Image (tube, grey):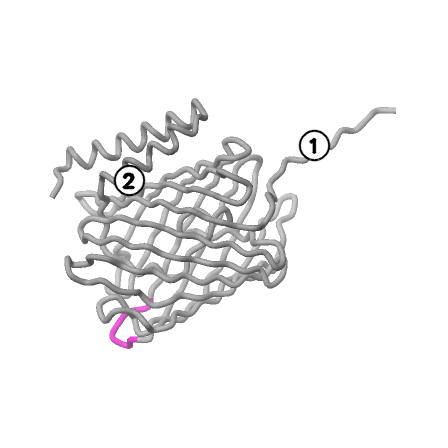
Amino acid sequence: MPTLTCIRAAISLTVWNAICYFFTMKKKCFFSFLFIFLLFGSSHAFDIAGIQPLAPDGVFSTFSTESLPKNKVSLELTLERSREADFYRSTIKGAYAISDNLEFIASVPYVLHFEDSIDGFEDIAIGFKHRFYDEGKYGPSLAYLLTASIPVGHDKLTTDGRAGIGFILSKRIGPFQGSFNLFYVRPGNGELNDEITFSSGIVFSATHNSEILAEFLAKKSHFTSEYDQLEARLGYRLRTTDSLFTTIGAGVDIKNRNPEYRLLLTITFTNAKDKKKIQRIIEEEE
């Protein structure tokens, strides 16, 4: 097991690469994080992944009210490495826009080496996100998300299905967009507790093709009656091509006396055009 010094070294390298990228805006600093991802593990107690947002319409686990244009599609692969409990997780996600404000989302997580010997799927999560109120000059945009999970997971990784509802609030102020989520999920297994999750995320548009991400998540999981997960996350997202996003991030558990860490790498493909172009209106005086 790596010492606390080694863990701090890994996090320090991660932060240094992020700062290097932010101030020099060179892609080589961004992709150097990928090398760190392969060498260092992160640690966090195992948690059910459930439904997750796809870039760029969200942070890591925090949804925004934004959605794809009608009939557009996004596909995403997320890789996660965690220590204590040790496991790897890969998640394939997809989103399809039924209309400009109604989106279908699905997540298929697969876990490797949990408790050293368990490999298998978690329950497949599906959901519908509907933005029912658009953002105004002062007010936020509002959406809700209905979600369910199909019980196909490994015995140690399943809740025998889940059903839940979430409320999403988003507001953009200049280059910043903030989002707040509140989710309630009930498991199919009656021996487990209901799950309640609160998360907030901020996206800062550093350049036309890059964003700085920050997120805070508090969760009362199915396995306890108190909030057993308090996690802060920091990351960067780069639009490498017109249809491809690459997101990197690190999370730290701020509840325990000895913090635990995880690293995330996400690659997203979408056929939707960039929706975030800045428009300037010039008025001429007569």
Left or right: residue 99 versus residue 244 is: right
Judge from the rendering whether residue 16 lies leftward or rightward of residue 211; answer left or right: left
Compared with 83, 173 (above or below) is above
Q: Quadrant of residue 221?
A: bottom left
Name the spot of residue 66 as percent of width and height, x first: 56, 51
Residue in the foreground of this view, choosing between 52 and 77: 77
Within-10-Å neighbours for mark 1: few <14, some 14–19, many 20+: few
Under mark 1, the amino acid is Arg
**Vertical side of 168 occupied by 32: above or below:** above
Q: Secondary structure at mark 2?
A: helix
Whether 112 is among the magenta residues is no
Q: Residue at x 30, y 60 (%)?
A: 110
The percent position of residue 33, horizontal first and vertical second, equals: 33, 35
Magenta stretch: give its range: 189-194
Q: Main secondary structure of the magenta part?
A: loop
Residue farthest along the top direction in this orientation: 24
Earlier-in-chain disc, 1 versus 2: 2
State the count of labels.
Answer: 2
Q: Which residue is mark 2?
A: 37
Distance of mark 1 from mark 2, alpha carbons? 40 Å
- Mark nearest the camera among 1 and 2 is 2
